[in-house]
Image (cartoon, rainbow, N blue to C red):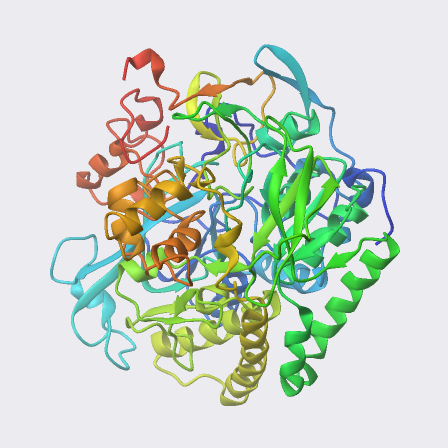
Amino acid sequence: MTASASESPGSTEPTEPTEPTEPTEPTEPTEPSGPSRLYDLAVIGAGSAGLAGAVTAAELGLSVALLDTATGTGGQFYRHPAPAVGALRPEALHHDWSAYAGLRRRLEASTVTRLGGHHVWTVSREGASGDGAFGEGAFREGASREGVFGDGEGPWTVHAVTGADGCAERPVRVWARAVLLATGAYERQLPFPGWTVPGVIGAGGAQAMLKSGLVLPGKRVVVAGSGPLLLAVASSLAAAGARVPAVIEASGYLAYARHPRVLAANPHKLAEAVVHGGTLLRHRVPLRTRSAVTEVHGRDRVEAVTVTRLDRDWRPLPGTARRIACDAVAVGHGLVPQIELATTLGCATRTTPDRATALLLDDLQETSVPDLWAAGETGGIGGARLARAEGELAGLAIAARLRGRPAHRGRVRELQRRRDRMRAFADAMAAAHAPGAGWSRWLTDDTDVCRCEEVTAGSIRAAVADLGARDARTVKLLTRAGMGWCQGRMCGSGVACLAAGDGVGEPPAERRPFATPVPLAALASLDEPADAGNAPADAGNAPGDAGRDPARGAHHPC
Amino acid sequence: MARARTPADLVGAQPGPSFEITFDGRPVPALPGQSVAAALWAADILAWRTTRVGGRPRGAFCGIGQCYDCLATINGTPNRRACLVPAGPGDAITTQEGHGHDRLGV
């Protein structure tokens, strides 16, 4: 399969690496796949969890397809420059790079089929007796419990569009007997006056642009919001040459002290904090807790920010505002699991201590939908080390299911112990940085809350106060907040809180047939013979030509 | 981590020769492997779209393809996510106004 960077207008061909430290990351599969290839396992997401799951399953003999939107592997945490940049020391921007290097070596030695530039928009499953390329008998071997092996259901179909930004539009289908969701997380944002001014960027976004593009958003970057990611971002920015006038944290770090046993059981987290703390100290970056950026100054570019002290509930304290000159702001309030593919299939969820929605998983990482597993941030934010443990655990469990043989019990128990220990830390961390109920006091009525549809706090409050909206969905229907390109990913937390009457709210678990924008041409081609997944680019009738079709779909921004 | 003068110093980058793209007609250097957004940031350009309602400037925000704030018109095609699309020699990036489909008369 070609991952078609070359089909994307304005893109370059993948380039050979210039340094041995950065092995090439081909978008071609490592083994040829026939037109109707059924994999044992499709892994969605090639970050820490997905990589660990894919190599573990492949080493146990499963055929595995590994899909990711990016061309390379590593996910957001191990995001790194493209091979063409020739970085001799990509590890200089990363914590624990050797763990990723180890997974990558195992991937290169494995039979895993790597499908880079694949944007999965839905996962579906049909009855084995129904349509599809495979007969019922294909799913009977290794029967062990309910699911594909017992109740006559067919394989999973993983639907993707391709290209750097999904605009190459050649739709792809991959079939698999089991699916591992390792789709990671995105950043939680809370709006504040001026947060749409150019120069205000996500803290994770600043980190991503630095790690992959080796660029900074400005020379003086204030880092603000809440959560431990801020410390990592500030130390990376400072190390890469930016001035960081301050890190502004809305919570207090003392909240961790309420969990002494959890801290003691996770010394690696303390070590990580010491590394970042040391970097910040060395670059003389002050950390201000119980404070927030409550206004950005500048019209077409950030010129300064106003920082205000907060009370315990994140209410701004009058008379405490001070101005800090800067030309960029990197902001974020923790991470939220990216789970649309699973919630659309009806997977059970849980609410995390910071009121995010995460997948509810069993002891072996399976979701409430049989044969659909998840690992890493999808089950709650916990970091790369936890993701690796969960990915491996899922890989072991999936291999055991498909092979009909029990997994190595000692290893499973060891991984479960590590997972539980790190999950306890993750819960303490989420509780310590959970947004306080008073944050929306810093909004002015003309603050844009929904960036895509340009819906202000004032109009959302009017929908609540005057029109009787009580939840984010009603607010959306009345105001269009959350209805734009990002589908509420950026404004969802803010809208939910405003819908709850300026209190605390949580965005509903979305059931969304499209996890990413899809061109109508790609949808139309679903009626084509079921070989799109592995067909060469000779399917000139619909899929291959979709990229040049001027009639773009309403679901797709192109 | 010691302070480096630039991010490229920090990771010891030895990229291939830079090439040229244009932003609203003016030349901007780009490095092999850089996204369009990264190349624009390197030239101190932070906005390359104006919003549909307020006509306000926008650029990259989430940096990972989730927020769609970085939409740009690339080689005449509007609504490309600049943080995901790799820059290629000669690419013409233009500021996208509104939904970018003005010429369709919609």
Residue at x 17%, y 65% (from the top left corner)? A136
**Quick one: A247 or A51, which is closer to the camera?**
A247
**Quick one: A527 or A555, which is closer to the camera?**
A555
Task: Answer whether residue A304 is visible to the viewer in this image.
Answer: yes
Task: Answer whether residue A93 is visible to the viewer in this image.
Answer: no
Residue A389: % across, % down: 56, 74
**Quick one: B43 or A127, which is closer to the camera?**
B43
Residue at x 31%, y 25% (from the top left corner)? A545
Q: Is residue A96 left or right of residue A469?
A: right
> Which residue occupies the extreme front position in the image?
A319
Image vertical order of residue A462 relative to residue A137, above or below = above
Residue A47: % across, % down: 54, 57
Residue at x 58%, y 23% (from the top left corner)? B88
Which of the 4 quarters of the picture holds residue A96? bottom right
Residue A464: % across, % down: 30, 51
Image vertical order of residue A498 relative to residue B79, above or below = below
Image quadrant where one finds the N terminus of chain A: top left
